[in-house]
Image (tube, helix red, strand yellow):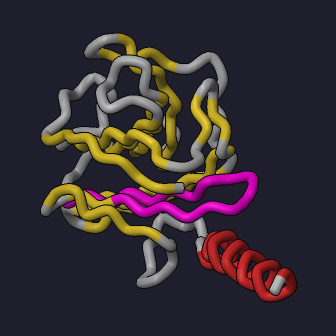
């Protein structure tokens, strides 16, 4: 009996953590690349996979601007946010880590993004990134509050076109 329970636990953890091996951080989200998909708006989806150390996040919006997700709070205040956008000065996509302060955000002292990529085709923006499962005072484990937003501009000062909140399971 103990062997059977151990085998089931091992198989479950291999399946849960194995999903992260499918993720290729290239700015293109393939079918079944991520283990979880969250279609939170008709024009915005985000995707999550993870292993024991890192979380892999993809964001996709029908918009020509920045896209973002934040973890740890059901509102901007105290949320750790990651904003993906096309940096025209550097001619590449970047992901900036910010901290929510009331109804605004400030750049985090340390950007914990391990890897990122993005692409824009027509009116669609896609950004993927990898972060540690422990970011600041937030651990991406169990049920986690998530906020999301996107804008029609890559200016980080641009107000979001849409926003919302949900919960995800790690």
Which residue lies at the image location 45% right of the left edge and 60% below the top edge? Answer: 58
Is 24 colored magenta in this rendering? no
| Horizontal side of residue 38 vs 79, given as left or right | left
Of the 4 image quadrants, the one containing the N terminus is bottom right
Is 61 colored magenta in this rendering? yes
| Horizontal side of residue 15 vs 5, given as left or right | left
| Image location of residue 61, percent across then percent down | 25, 57
Which residue lies at the image location 62% right of the left edge and 16% below the top edge? Answer: 109
Outermost residue on the right side: it is 3
| Image location of residue 99, percent across then percent down | 47, 21
Which residue lies at the image location 55% right of the left edge and 53% below the top edge? Answer: 129
| Image location of residue 164, percent across then percent down | 21, 41
What secondary structure do most residues of the magenta stretch adopt?
A: strand
Give above or below for 42 relative to 67: below
| Horizontal side of residue 48 vs 52, given as left or right | left
Q: Quadrant of residue 78?
A: top left
Outermost residue on the top side: it is 102
Give above or below for 138 relative to 17: above
Query: Is residue 131 among the parts visible in the rendering?
Result: yes
Magenta residue span:
46-62
Q: Nearer the viewer, residue 111 or 40?
A: 40
Of the 4 image quadrants, the one containing the C terminus is bottom right
Q: Quadrant of residue 112?
A: top right
Query: Is residue 88 among the parts visible in the rendering?
Result: no
| Image location of residue 151, percent across then percent down | 21, 41
Q: How many marks?
A: 0
Outermost residue on the front side: it is 1
Give above or below for 108 relative to 118: above
Which residue lies at the image location 68% right of the left edge and 53% below the top edge? Answer: 54
């Amino acid at each position: 009996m103990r062997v059977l329970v151990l085998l089931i636990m091992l198989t479950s953890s291999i399946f849960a953590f194995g999903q992260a091996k499918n993720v290729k951080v290239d700015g293109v989200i393939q079918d079944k690349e991520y283990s979880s998909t969250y279609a939170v708006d008709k024009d915005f989806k985000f995707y999550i996979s993870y292993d024991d150390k890192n979380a892999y996040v993809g964001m996709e919006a029908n918009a020509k601007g920045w896209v973002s997700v934040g973890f740890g709070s059901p509102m901007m205040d105290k949320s750790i946010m990651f904003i993906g956008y096309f940096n025209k000065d550097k001619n590449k996509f970047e992901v900036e880590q910010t901290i929510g302060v009331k109804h605004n955000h400030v750049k985090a002292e340390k950007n914990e993004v391990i890897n990122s990529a993005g692409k824009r085709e027509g009116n669609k923006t896609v950004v993927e990134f990898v972060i540690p499962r422990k970011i600041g005072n937030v651990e991406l484990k169990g049920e986690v509050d998530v906020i999301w937003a996107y804008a029609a501009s890559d200016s980080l000062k641009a107000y979001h076109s849409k926003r919302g909140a949900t919960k995800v399971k790690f």
